[in-house]
Amino acid sequence: MVAGVQKGAQPTSDALQRAFALKLNKYLPGLERVFQDYAIEASSRLGLNNFIRFLKEYQLLAKTEEEKGAEEYERVTIERAQIVFKQTIRQANAKLNFEQFLYALKLLSLDVYPAEAMKAESMEVTQVEMTATEHKAFFALLSRNILRTKPLRSGGQEDGLVAAEAHIQTMLDAMQDDDVAELVKILKQQVEPLARMFQATLTGLFDFEATVKFCQVYGVFPSLVSKARLKEFFSVFASFREQDAVNKVGKRLTSQAGEQEGTRYIDADLLGELLTTVALS
């Protein structure tokens, strides 16, 4: 069952993407460490040779066609790895950033777990079911082949993010109820005009400082939520926006007018979901 969707309910595309981002968020610290092990230190980007070395050392690369099915999963050929690499960067002599690395893994997951690929390509499944199947292959690759054991959490911020994710999961579960979903829709409509004066960019985005100011002016912070918990909620919702780029095109979000490099942002819809999470926590 898709996380955040009640048993027997048909998940919507938006709910599926939210569940994808929420689950991927738990894997990111370990995946970032793996990426940095192979990336060029000065640029934090991964070239083709190191990408091939990564696949080889994680036993995902087949030297010959006969080696492809030697395990309980399929290994990929060097030729296929090269195609995926070039398909992801889309320009000559470029290297993968972290989000593109994840997108390349997403493409390769259907080669590594072809049974899931066959299900996704079946004419009998809906678009939502096909997406869910693709996600299943992706997370199988991450958990079974790359993060063989879940990285140990070191406490502090990561523990706080786990608690924040639990509250957000509660919000996602609640939003499967039509009445709650309608209330959240009304809340977003009311928040949007009020939040405009707090926007951090010309494109209508909010950084953490803008989010705190909005919550302070309208009595959400500190009466309903601490700054530390608000920061944890913001971090998870910012990851939703960032992972949308991975899921769609495999590219890092390009900076728009007023955006600062290295600063995380949420949009008005995510701000509404953040406020809903605060109300339910």
Image (spheres, rainbow, N blue to C red):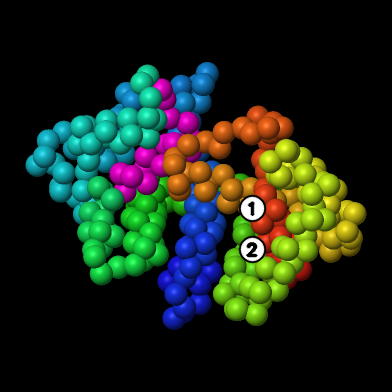
- Find residue 114 and report its horizontal and vertical position in percent: 23, 54
The local secondary structure at tag 2 comes to: helix
Principal secondary structure, stretch drawn in magenta: helix
Circle 1 packing at 10 Å, graded few (<14), some (14-19), many (20+), is many
Name the residue located 72 percent from the left edge and 63 percent from the top edge.
188
Name the residue located 47 percent from the left edge and 70 percent from the top edge.
11
Instruction: Report the quarter where the N terminus lies.
Output: bottom left
- Find residue 111 and report its horizontal and vertical position in percent: 25, 47
- Find residue 25 and report its horizontal and vertical position in percent: 54, 51
Q: Is residue 11 left or right of 169 when viewed as pictured? A: left
Vertical comparison of 247 with 189: above or below: above
Vertical comparison of 140 with 7: above or below: above
Q: Which residues are magenta?
A: 94-109
Instruction: Kindly identify the amino acid type of the residue bearing the numbered disc 2.
Output: Ile
> Magenta stretch containing residue 18, yes or no?
no
Name the residue located 58 percent from the left edge and 51 percent from the top edge.
240
Give me the C-alpha separation between circle 1 and circle 2. 9 Å
> Magenta stretch containing residue 97, yes or no?
yes
* Residue 232 shows up from this direction: no
Q: Which mark is residue 237?
A: 1
Circle 2 packing at 10 Å, graded few (<14), some (14-19), many (20+), is many
